[in-house]
Image (spheres, rainbow, N blue to C red):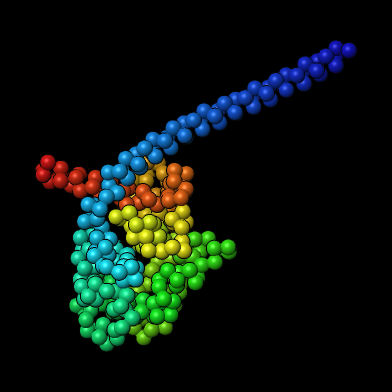
Amino acid sequence: MSKKEEIFLDIKLFYKLKLYINTLYIQYTYSYYQIIANSIMKKIERQLNEWFKQYHKSEFLTIDPLVSVRKIKSNPDREVGALIASVISYGRVEIIIKNCEQLFSLMNWKPAEFVTSTSIKKNEKMFSEFRHRFTSSEDIVLLMEVLGKIIRTSGSIEQFFIEGYDHREMSFKDAIVSFCKRVKKIARENVLYSGRGFEYLFPSPESGSACKRINMFLRWVVRDEDTIDLGLWKMIKPSQLIMPVDTHIAEQSKKLKLTKRNAADWKMAEEITNVFRKIDPDDPVRFDFSLCRAGMMGKRNEGRRMNGEW
């Protein structure tokens, strides 16, 4: 073998050895970061489960609109009541609960029966004094009309939702888009439709909105009955649900490093849901109620300390 050939073989061996060392380094580095990531995920999972045990209890429903829905007796009435309560769930929770109770009381605590049996004229008179922040009495009367039509034509809100959802062709996001579009289409065909007020009740993922209220409604009716959620729907699986993201969930999720996003939008909701799916693939949004309560209680306790109550 010539000197030239020996040098060539030495160089070839050198590069093979370098490639092998680099491969080992990459594998080691990947394994190291995988161990770190798994360790962080385990810590997050422990914290979430601690909050779940602490807060996923009916005693914390006193600061949730579901406390009003649970006073309704029959499942068909609860389904309609849940949608009404969810779409006006913006603002201070105490005001939301007070206004839900006012509405349900006017309906004799039988929302499904009410929306299918009353007239526009009667409802305009009955709800004339009602207002919830941006939602006027006219918006509420229109909501009653829309829900009445849905129940009369589809039999239930669940069936109406399913009619616009082909799971073989559509994502769950698409199903929510379809639901909101069809609800607003019914509203636009009504003489009471005035535009923005009613549209605000049914934001769509198409606009980038986190759609906290519709995702919360879906959590209420899809997740199994567990003293918090209602377990009314049987044609949608809890594994399909998207996390309802509000300010409390967004802040808690950022603290836990569940999302890199700043805006509480649809992409953030998907990011958080994807993390929870790694922890509980069958029921990723089960942490919603407890995570939200942890954020709310933390803020309230901080407020008490600042006011000198502790």
**Front residue of this view, candidates 154 and 292:** 154
Quick one: quadrant of the N terminus?
top right
Q: Quadrant of residue 149?
A: bottom left
Task: Residue at the far front: name it.
Answer: 74
Q: Quadrant of residue 209?
A: bottom left
Q: Is residue 119 left or right of residue 178?
A: left
Q: How many numbered marks are there?
A: 0
Q: Residue at x 47, y 48 (%)?
A: 281
Task: Residue at the far right: name it.
Answer: 1
Task: Residue at the far bottom: name it.
Answer: 121
Q: Residue at x 47, y 34 (%)?
A: 37
Q: Is residue 153 left or right of residue 103?
A: right
Q: Is residue 208 visible?
A: yes
Q: Quadrant of residue 93?
A: bottom left
Q: Residue at x 43, y 55 (%)?
A: 238
Q: Residue at x 24, y 65 (%)?
A: 71
Residue 258 is situated, as x and y percent measured from the top left of the image, at 41, 44
> Above or below — where is 281 with respect to 170?
above
Q: Is residue 179 visible?
A: no
> Above or below — where is 272 with respect to 50?
below
Residue 158 is situated, as x and y percent measured from the top left of the image, at 42, 69
Residue 15 is situated, as x and y percent measured from the top left of the image, at 72, 22
Residue 168 is situated, as x and y percent measured from the top left of the image, at 58, 63
Quick one: quadrant of the C terminus?
top left
> Above or below — where is 149 with respect to 280?
below
Q: Is residue 18 left or right of residue 34?
A: right
